[in-house]
Image: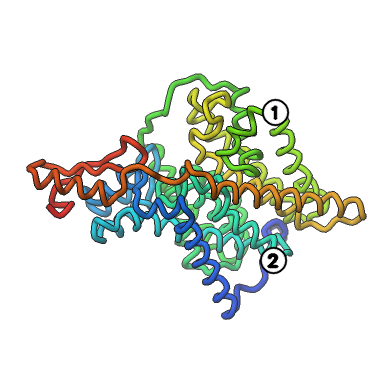
Amino acid sequence: MATAERSSALAGSVIPLPEEPPHERAWLGYSFCFVLSVAFLLLIPPGWARLDHLWAEDGARFMVDAVRTPTLTNLIEPYGGYLHTLPRLVAEVVALLPLEWTAAGFAIAAAMLRALVALITFAASGAYLRSTPLRLALASLVVVLPAGNSETLNNMSNLHWFLLYGAFWALLWRNAPRVPVALFVFLAALTSPLVFILAPIALVRLVLPRKEVPITFLVGLVVQGLAMLLATRTPYSHDEVDPVQVLLSSLLRVPVVAFTGSERVGQIYPALGNLLILGALLAAAVPMAAGLRFGDRAGRTLVLVAGAYSVIVILACLVLNWTQVLQVQAPEVVMAAQRYSIAPCLFLFTAIFVGLDATPGRMWERAVVGASRYVVGIAVVVSVFAHLQEPKTVLRGIPWDESLAKARADCAAGAPEARLEHEPKDWFFVVPCRSVGR
């Protein structure tokens, strides 16, 4: 019994109990922030374009399978070597809507789920960050971070990068609403191939009261693991992994992209070279060191865990999917597979914000960490506003309504099936003509 009590006390010290769940009045604030987040994601220029442009697997995999395959079979069908249960579930719902609404349906669903991840981040971080403005800023990064608002914006195909981060915070949220959060982590585990890195957190949570969330997560983890063992995965390439290139690409794709966004790296890195990497590392290292020096046990643990997850995720993505286009000498430097930056950047900012929230003791320490707040804050704000002016993020390929009209015209002319083209270029899927209303 004494050993169990000691284990519970140790687990409680690294995963502390947050303040009481939001009271009734606070839910109005949560609702307002949710609506504001969804509006931002949908109404910024790139987001507006997503309402009439279907992206990649949202059409060519999830939508076509929802149309052609029985629901249960569709939900448990692996793709790319792992399960995508939540995107497939959304596709089943979108398939019930008029076909004209398909692009908007996927975009709105993805924006709402991403806003939900931001709310989970804000609520769960209360146990680690004393400053409400810092909690709000960390949660806002889930929505406004430039790295997340290009390739991964408002599509279900890339939502798993945000779900991984959301599951991380959901497992740390000890007094979360049980049923909805348990359902969230279960679906996240059935959607992301990287959720296995969160297993240690779930196991620690099992020592503490309210075990529904970690148990549900681990059940989803087992199902995902079995699916990955039985599924086949076609590698992107057979190029030999270059350790030096992996290291440079990792440093550019995480600390640098975190402060600049992916698009600007291609402009800045050729001019500054590795000085850019050193500057980004310094900007991240100072507050993280403050978190390790001044934080409590929970804060120090979170700095180490979040920092480790940032490194693990980016290295796993690059090593497992290595191809020559990921080299830093490639055109536009880190624009290829920029989705790999999402979760690592969010984990990195988690470690940074714990340090920014720590209270230094001596005057010079307060000055150093205070300066870090301004450096991090200014860099992120500038990158967000610069990204909003980036024209490349707006989709300009064939709009969904034009693709649908063309498919219907082909069917009316006697074609046996409808070919529905969508973004990015050369992506399409084929369904029976009856599915397009002809």
Q: Which mark is residue 161?
A: none
- Please give the name of the residue rendered at 18% of the width and 52% of the height, measured from the top-left corner: 436
**Residue type, label 2:** Thr
Residue highlighted by disc 1: 274
Q: Quadrant of residue 296?
A: bottom right
Comes first in the chain, label 2 or label 1? 2
Q: Nearer the viewer, residue 220 or 18?
A: 18
Q: x and y percent of residue 179 in the render?
A: 47, 67
C-alpha span from label 2 to label 1: 35 Å
Residue topped by disc 2: 132
Frontmost of labels 2 and 1 is 1
Residue located 67% across and 70% down the image? 19
Residue 232 place in picture, x, y as percent: 36, 33
Query: Residue at horizontal 47%, vertical 66%?
Result: 180
Q: Residue at x 51, y 48 (%)?
A: 149
Tell me which corner region of the image, top left, top right, bottom left or bottom right, holds residue 307.
Answer: top right
Residue 223 location in percent, x, y? 41, 48
Q: Please provide percent x and percent y for residue 333.
A: 56, 30
| Residue 364 visible, this angle | yes
Kind of element beneath mark 1 = helix
Can residue 8 be seen here? The reply is: no
